[in-house]
Image (cartoon, helix red, strand yellow):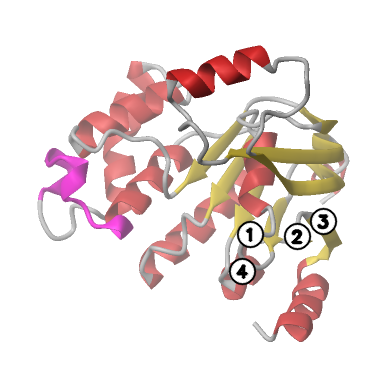
């Protein structure tokens, strides 16, 4: 227990007054047109181009995540949860503030970029390489990845193109690929919501294993039971602001009282 306590004081992610702003182009000229491109060039250094709307998606969020924690992110649709994960993963720049990470963050979502025209088999290899695994590691873990995903339980789907998969099958394979590797920081965006009960149980157990292996797990989910079963801490976001950060049950009860969910 003493070892777990000491691990819990090692920061893995620090968000310091993070603001994230999207810029959404209007219809004038068409985003890809020559006229629009010339207009952007001419207006450089002169403020925002005409017709561009700012969306302030994350507003002044600050927190510190520690090694060994599993942290749930909750909030209504459009509250900034997925945007915040993308910033932690280094996929979105901050408008203001900083994100500091210890180690390499890995973002897993149901829309993770696997190749729909390639077989599941090939995607396992490419996904593993993208996470920094060697070909030898992928070969050694390949069967475990397939078995964990459960996509071959009703046929040899791993040899078929991913475009033939249901959304649930594809999500399970993505999670299985990501979960095959120990991560410094693993971020899961709704990946468990599409699995059946048996897969959710396996996934939750794997998340607990990842925590024991000294990683930090972030989980975005609209399923409060999954958050309760998996996370020991919760961040509650609304309209881009961090409303509450604390123990899972405390935050979820406040969220449920407020939203009725």
* Circles 3 and 2: CB atoms closer than 8 Å: yes
Q: Is residue 64 visible?
A: yes
**Residue 15, position in %: x, y?**
83, 38
Q: Earlier in the sequence, mark 4 or mark 3?
A: 4
In the rendered view, would you say 215 is above or below 171?
above
- Callout 4: few (<14), some (14-19), or many (20+) C-alpha neighbours within 10 Å? few
Q: Nearer the viewer, mark 1 or mark 4?
A: 1
**Residue 159, position in %: x, y?**
12, 39
**Residue 14, position in %: x, y?**
83, 36
- Residue 229 bears which disc, if any? 4
- Image quarter in which the C terminus is found: bottom right
Q: CA distance from mark 2 to mark 1?
A: 7 Å
Q: Is residue 118 left or right of residue 202?
A: left
- Callout 1: few (<14), some (14-19), or many (20+) C-alpha neighbours within 10 Å? few
**Residue 184, position in %: x, y?**
65, 32
- The local secondary structure at tag 3 comes to strand
Q: Nearer the viewer, mark 4 or mark 3?
A: 3
The region drawn magenta spans 156-168
User: Would residue 205 be counted in the magenta stretch?
Assistant: no
- Residue 241 bears which disc, if any? 3
In the rendered view, would you say 82 is above or below 122?
below
- Residue 239 bears which disc, if any? 2
- Callout 2: few (<14), some (14-19), or many (20+) C-alpha neighbours within 10 Å? some
* Circles 2 and 1: CB atoms closer than 8 Å: yes
Q: Earlier in the sequence, mark 1 or mark 3?
A: 1
Q: Residue at x 76, y 47 (%)?
A: 58
Q: Earlier in the sequence, mark 2 or mark 4?
A: 4
């Amino acid at each position: 227990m003493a070892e777990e306590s000491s691990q819990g004081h090692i920061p893995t992610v620090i968000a310091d007054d993070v603001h994230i702003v999207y810029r959404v182009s209007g219809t004038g000229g068409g985003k890809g047109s020559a006229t629009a491109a010339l207009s952007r060039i001419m207006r450089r250094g002169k403020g925002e181009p005409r017709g561009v709307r700012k969306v302030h998606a994350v507003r002044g969020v600050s927190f510190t995540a520690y090694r060994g924690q599993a942290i749930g992110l909750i909030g209504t649709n459009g509250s900034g949860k997925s945007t915040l994960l993308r910033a932690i993963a280094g996929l979105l720049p901050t408008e203001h503030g900083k994100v500091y990470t210890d180690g390499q963050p890995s973002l897993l979502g149901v829309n993770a970029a696997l190749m729909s025209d390639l077989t599941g088999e090939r995607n396992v290899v490419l996904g593993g390489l993208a996470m920094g695994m060697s070909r030898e590691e992928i070969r050694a873990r390949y069967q475990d990845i397939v078995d964990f995903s459960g996509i071959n339980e009703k046929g040899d789907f791993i040899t078929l193109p991913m475009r033939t998969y249901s959304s649930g099958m594809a999500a399970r394979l993505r999670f299985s690929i990501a979960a095959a590797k120990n991560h410094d920081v693993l971020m899961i965006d709704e990946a468990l919501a599409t699995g059946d009960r048996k897969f959710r149980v396996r996934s939750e157990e794997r998340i607990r294993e990842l925590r024991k292996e000294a990683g930090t797990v972030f989980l975005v989910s609209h399923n409060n039971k999954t958050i309760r079963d998996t996370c020991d801490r919760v961040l509650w976001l609304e309209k881009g602001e961090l409303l509450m950060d604390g123990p899972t049950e405390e935050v979820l009860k406040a969220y449920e009282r407020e939203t009725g969910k």
